Amino acid sequence: MEVKEVFQALFLHSTEGILVVDSKGKIIRINPSAEKMFGYDKDELLGQGIETGIPLLPASQPGENFFYTNPLPRSMGTETDLSGKRKDGSEFSIEISLSPYLKDDAAFVVVFVFDITIRKKNEQDVIQKKKELELLTEHLKESNLELENFAYISSHDLQEPLRKIQSFGDRLKSMERENFSEKGKDYLDRILNAASRMQNLINDLLEFSRLSNPVPEFSRIDSNMILNEVISDMEITIERTGANIIQGKLPFISGNPTQIRQLFQNLISNAIKFVKEEETPSLKIYAKSSGKITHIFFEDNGIGFDEKYVDRIFTIFQRLENRKYAGTGIGLAICKKIALFHHGNIEVSSKPGQGSIFKVTLPLWTSK
């Protein structure tokens, strides 16, 4: 096939519209795709000015020819909106590419026309969705702030009446208990136990609310040292339960020491608490690092749970077991929040009766 035939085939079968315009801006050739694009028959456009199909491209301007002032190939409509106009008057978004050339001392321009209507619509949809998402995010932030403030204020305001209940309950127990009937003593003990559980719940809720405040600037943390401090703080509990804690070497991480200490303490406390009867708690703590992150594993021999509940376990106030085990259902929610604040995550794998493995993802410390 000769070169001329190749170009003729490209002109006739191209999916883009192609117009050839003379030095006066008149259309002298048009391919089938351009006919279809603009809704004209070929004979209706031949001899017409280019502005017939592309209104923003006048054939000429006073004192100069629009196309040949700068006779270089160039695109239009990529940075500014450009519209094509169909025979029926409707407009559609286009981009064009202009390719001037000379033949026998005559100047011509080949105009390639691209219908970008669908792309423009998609771009507008993306912009609209982005605006809607930004608005929704702002509303969520406001709602979360209101909820966090409510939780903090409510919990704080509950402290004073609770202190009175505990204080007068303790006085009754120490000063008047012997004057109570057995039923009265039982009622008093129940009141004090309920008040104690309420105090723990309020403390945990206050802690959860505080975590919603901005995280302090991160620093270099020796996670081995943090872990040793937590284990030392929990020495009495560990001795009482006979818990066996196996420590692997942990890396230096980037974070807030107070929050990481709380994260470790909650996970260790859970491992010791949720253990089968007549079984000694056992916990392995080790790390695997890759790139800029580390995964710290807490592998226990506890009661475990069915993984179909995995989405609930990190939700505030959610408890998978009955009230046999003490707690408020906030500890793992706090762990999740701390991990997310550190641009990490926490996941768990488990089976009923076979223990659980919590995997905490945290950023490694890297020198600036």
Image: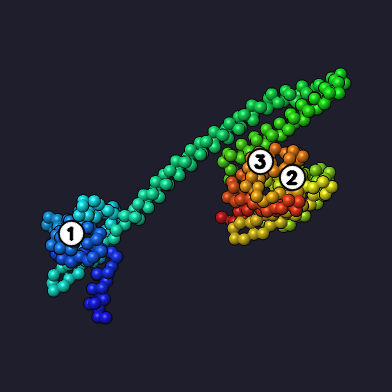
Indicate whether 4 appears above or below 80.
below
User: What distance separates the C-alpha of mark 2 from that of mark 3?
Assistant: 17 Å
Question: 200 and 119: which one is in front?
Answer: 119
- What's the residue type where badge 1 is placed? Ile
Mark 2 or 3: in front is: 3
Q: Is mark 1 on a helix, strand or loop?
A: helix
Determine whether label 1 and label 3 are within 8 Å by CB. Answer: no
Query: Residue beneath label 1, please?
Result: 50
The tag on residue 331 is none
Indicate whether 180 appears above or below 80.
above
- Residue 100 left/right relative to 367: left
At x 64%, y 34%, the residue is 206
Q: What element carries label 3?
A: loop
- Residue 142 left/right relative to 283: left
Label 2, residues with CA under 10 Å away: few <14, some 14-19, many ≥20? some
At x 21%, y 51%, the residue is 89
Indicate whether 247 appears above or below 216.
below
Label 3, residues with CA under 10 Å away: few <14, some 14-19, many ≥20? some
The C terminus: image quadrant: bottom right
Query: Residue beneath label 2, please?
Result: 269
Q: Where is residue 354 in the image (x, y as percent from the top left)?
A: 75, 53
Q: In which image quadrant can residue 320 be found?
A: top right
Q: Position of residue 153 (x, y in %)?
A: 60, 29
User: What distance separates the C-alpha of mark 1 from that of mark 3?
Assistant: 69 Å
